[in-house]
Amino acid sequence: MELLICEEMLLLALDGEKGGTTWLSGWTALTGGVLVDAIAAGAVTVEDETLRPGEEPAHPLLRRVREAVAAEGQPRTVGDWVQRLPIVLDPLVEAVAARLVEDGVLGEEHGTILGLIPTTRFPEVDPTAEQVLRTRLRSVLVQGAEPSPHDLLLIALVEPAGLLATATGEDERAVRRAARKRGAELAERATTDPDGGAAVAAVSSVTSGAALAAMMGAVVATTAAHTSTTTTSTSTSTSTSPTED
């Protein structure tokens, strides 16, 4: 199963056993992940810094994003949607977790705090997807592999929140520091990367509540390049948060 960026962000943030998270500073970035996924899938498009409905996507979460954008009488800016989307998808975490629960990656447990405040937890049922994700990130952060456009955007979105450390949490301090430095360098490098472009330049503004406006043009370019590569490849085959120190 190929996961969305926002789904992978959630897997990195969740406590596998308890199913909760303390990643309180990251929900704006998670919203950014949903928007980037929607743009990459063509579910929404960016015109004059505003979002417009695009093609009908297969993923149910991205369909909800498209429907919300299409329902607006006047186009809203990307910055507006960073703030509005969590309301539209409320509760946001449950919306992002839905397919992971349906596919058996996560469980879903409902409870209350003091018998009054409802809570929902998502303990891990099948660790395979998270293990594959961490292995992939580790190959980039520790072994120096070149990240794909998808992983470059993922790293850029979660690096400011410290979630990349989950891929190296059991390593020695020197390895963790080197991986943290590598992650920061990739996020910085991506701001001038021809495939990622300005996409990751706005990561810091995303986590502070500002819009992904600077990200959108590069996400579109990245998506176009990826689609072109995939099409060419298909044609050819037819003729394939831990605490930081």
Image: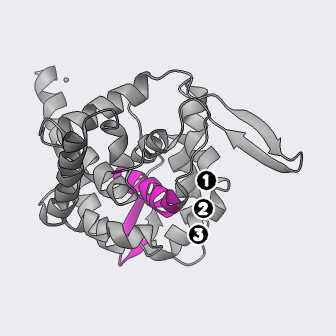
Q: Is residue 214 left or right of residue 122?
A: left
Residue 120 place in picture, x, y as percent: 71, 41
- At 21% from the left and 45% from the top, the residue drawn is 179
Residue 148 in view here: no
Comes first in the chain, label 1 or label 3:
3
Categorize mark 1 by other alpha carbons within 10 Å: few (<14), some (14-19), many (20+).
Answer: some
Labels 1 & 2 near each other (Cβ < 8 A)? yes
Marks 1 and 2, how far apart at CA: 5 Å
Where is residue 44, by image quadrant?
bottom left
Comes first in the chain, label 1 or label 2:
2
Q: Nearer the viewer, residue 169 or 200?
A: 169
* Amino acid type at mark 3: Arg
User: Which residue does the numbered mark 1 point to in the structure image?
Assistant: 92
* Residue bounds of the magenta highlight: 25-50
Labels 2 & 3 near each other (Cβ < 8 A)? yes
Which SS type dominates the magenta stretch? Answer: helix
- At 38% from the left and 56% from the top, the residue drawn is 36
Q: Which label was assigned to residue 84?
A: 3
- At 27% from the left and 46% from the top, the residue drawn is 150
Foreground label between 1 and 3: 1
Q: Is residue 41 left or right of residue 113?
A: left
Query: Callout 2: helix, strand or loop?
Result: helix
Where is residue 128, by image quadrant?
top left
Instruction: Report the quarter where the N terminus lies.
Output: top left
Q: Within the magenta stretch, is there residue 30?
A: yes
Residue 138 place in picture, x, y as percent: 24, 35
Marks 1 and 3, how far apart at CA: 11 Å
* Amino acid type at mark 1: Leu
In the rendered image, the residue lying farthest to the right is 115
* Amino acid type at mark 2: Pro
User: Which residue does the numbered mark 2 point to in the structure image?
Assistant: 86
